Amino acid sequence: MVVYSNQEPEIFHGSRLQLNATIGTVNTIFLISSGYFMARSAHYFKNGQNIRTLFFLRLTMFGGLLFLILKSIEYCTKIETGLTIGHNTFFTFYWMLTLFHVIHVIVGLVILISLYFGLRKKEPLVNLEDFEASAAFWHMCDLIWLLLFPVIYLLF
């Protein structure tokens, strides 16, 4: 993306200005918060506090859901204004990178939902390794966004 931005600086700068940095910032807050909640959930899981584990796991999933809702609203406005994947090089990168991330968030939510229902059973079906792997995947989604957000919304 950086190479192309050097080749087409006007297109990249003008295209970035068509993004809503406020939406990107709010989505960043949603994901950072959900990452914090996931860390709290993991802490309580390790300490055998199932009720608190489930509470923070619900907050984690809620943050991911809010991210997806806001990203969907952003996508709809981009499509309505004709800023689709083929609009220009910048928007090709925008769509490919953000959709790649959205897919990971959806997969992460599926993992967290299965984790949640596994924990709700009288005899939990979740062990520490499964929980930690799920938490690591969710934190990877946070990390990807923390790399994408400044590159897409702020740098060009």
Image (cartoon, rainbow, N blue to C red):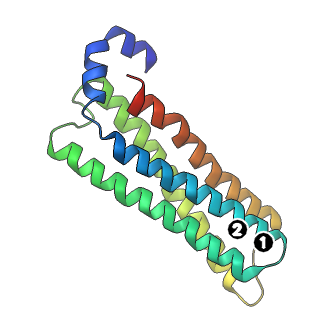
What crowding class fits label 1: few (fewer than 14 Cα within 10 Å), some (14-19), or many (20 or more)? Answer: many
How many marks the image carries: the answer is 2
x, y (%) of residue 55?
63, 77
Other residues around mark 2 within 10 Å, as few (<14) / some (14–19) / many (≥20): many
* Residue 24, x across and y down, in percent: 39, 44
Q: Can you say which quadrant of the picture contains the C terminus?
A: top left
Image coordinates for residue 31, horizontal then vertical, percent: 53, 53
- Hey, what amino acid is under mark 1? Phe
Q: Position of residue 15 (x, y in %)?
A: 26, 27
Query: Which residue is depicted at the point 58% across and 65% down?
Result: 60
The kind of secondary structure element at disc 1 is: helix
Q: Quadrant of the N terminus?
A: top left
Residue 130: quarter of image = bottom right
Q: Report whether 50 appears left or right of 37.
A: right
Residue 124 sits above or below residue 84 on the image: below
Residue 41, numbered circle: 2
Q: Residue furthest bottom?
A: 122
How far, Cα to Cα, is label 2 from label 1?
Answer: 6 Å
Amino acid on which disc 2 is placed: Ser
Q: Is residue 42 above or below residue 125?
A: above
Quarter of the figure with residue 18: top left
Residue situated in front as seen by the camera: 31 or 85: 31
Residue extending farthest to the top is 7
* Residue 32, disc: none
Mark 2 vs 1: CB contact within 8 A: yes
Q: Which SS class for mark 2?
A: helix
Q: Residue at x 21, y 29 (%)?
A: 87
Identify the residue position indicated by label 1 in the image: 45
Q: Residue, x 48% and y 58% (percent of image)?
A: 106
Q: Residue furthest left?
A: 81
In the rendered image of this protein, does residue 26 appear above or below residue 44?
Answer: above
Residue reaching furthest to the right: 47
